[in-house]
Structures are given as structure tokens and as C-alpha cells.
């Protein structure tokens, strides 16, 4: 039950910060929305109930660092696509493909984070997740080679128990 209160508090704080409206109507909407989302999705965010507050704080810090790294990858991918579109002969490098790989990530939230990270990165889209297998559309060889497991390892590191290790993903053309 404390995890639900924490989720509700995080959602309500986010609602207040992003809405910027503090009248009774909007606060009531925020309470209702936050309570509904908490009820529906609390098992997704806090799958492991044994983690301490210190572990959660460490995960939050690692997640913030990961999001910074992800934004840098988005910039690099945008530059790659810009080069493909504008450079002479760049379109010759556009060779769409679907690649397949198995993930070592265990929880639904970790897989959700990986799938969305891939899709946010220009040039790649997560098409389907079948258990531990990801199918990803990549616009070029460079975009496909970016699925080398580094993103997966970084996500695994966010949620890793002390002494835990993540294996790299194996990528193959589907």
C-alpha cells in the first residue's frame, strides 16, 4: 500500500507542476486522474516491492542519467538521418530492415522502457515484443547497428541489484 501512495504522490505532483492551475476544479481533476492511473498501473512501476527507499532513490538517479544519455542518442540519430536525407549519396545508405533480438530484461517495465527508448530514437521503431524477443524496424545499417545492446545494458543497470550484471543483446536480421 505505501507504494500506491508514493505513485499517487508522484503523479499528483506531476499534474500540479505541468498544469500550473491550482483552482478547485483542476486539483479535483488531478486527484481523480492520479487515483485512477495509480489503481490501473501501480503494479507496472513498482513490480519489486522489496526495494528500499534508498534503492528507489538510486534507481531514480540512474534513470535521470539514462534519460540524459538517451537524449544525446536522439540528437546523434537525428544528425544521422539528416545526413542521409541531405548528403549527396546519403539516400543510397537507406536500406530499411527488420531486426530481431532477445532481451535479458525481466520485468514488463524494463521492456516497456527499452521499447519506448528504441522508438524515441529516430531511425528505429519497435514493431513487436513477443516475450523476450523484440522486432525493430531500422532505416539503415547504422541505425540497426545501434541495437548492439548498450541501451539494454544501461536499462538493466538502472534496476540492477547490487552485484547484478546484464548480458548484451544479440541482434539478427528477421
Image (cartoon, helix red, strand yellow):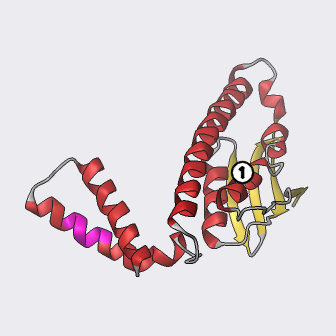
Residue 86: where, in percent of width, then height? 69, 21
Residue at the (69%, 42%) spot, across then down = 123
Q: Report the residue marked by disc 1.
A: 154
Farthest bottom residue?
1
Q: Nearer the viewer, residue 163 or 63?
A: 163
Q: Could you say which quadrant of the image residue 90 lies in? A: top right
Magenta residue span: 29-34
Residue 61 appears left or right of 29:
right
In the picture, the quarter occupied by the C terminus is bottom right
**Could you tell whether 89 is left or right of 172 in the image?**
left
Mark 1: secondary structure: helix
Q: Residue at x 71, y 69 (%)?
A: 129
Residue 49, above or below 79: below
Q: Residue 134 at x, y = what percent?
A: 76, 64
Check residue 91 for magenta coloring. no
Residue 56 location (% of width, % of height): 54, 62
Q: In terms of depth relative to the viewer, which is nearer, 72 or 63?
A: 63
Which SS type dominates the magenta stretch? Answer: helix
Instruction: Tell me which residue sits at (58%, 51%) in the image.
Output: 63
Amino acid at each position: 500500500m505505501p507504494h500506491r501512495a508514493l505513485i499517487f504522490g508522484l503523479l499528483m505532483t506531476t499534474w500540479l507542476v505541468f498544469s500550473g492551475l491550482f483552482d478547485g476544479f483542476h486539483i479535483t481533476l488531478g486527484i481523480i486522474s492520479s487515483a485512477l492511473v495509480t489503481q490501473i498501473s501501480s503494479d507496472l512501476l513498482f513490480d519489486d516491492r522489496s526495494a528500499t527507499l534508498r534503492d528507489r532513490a538510486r534507481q531514480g538517479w540512474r534513470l535521470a542519467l539514462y534519460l540524459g544519455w538517451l537524449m544525446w542518442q536522439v540528437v546523434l540519430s537525428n544528425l544521422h538521418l539528416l545526413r542521409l536525407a541531405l548528403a549527396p549519396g546519403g539516400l543510397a545508405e537507406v536500406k530499411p530492415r527488420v531486426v530481431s533480438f532477445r532481451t535479458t530484461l525481466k520485468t514488463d517495465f524494463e521492456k516497456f522502457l527499452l521499447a519506448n527508448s528504441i522508438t524515441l530514437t529516430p531511425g528505429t521503431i519497435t514493431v513487436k515484443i513477443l516475450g523476450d524477443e523484440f522486432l525493430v524496424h531500422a532505416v539503415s545499417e547504422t541505425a540497426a547497428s545501434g541495437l548492439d545492446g548498450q541501451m539494454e545494458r544501461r536499462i538493466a543497470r538502472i534496476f540492477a541489484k547490487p552485484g547484478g550484471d546484464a548480458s548484451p543483446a544479440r541482434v539478427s536480421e528477421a
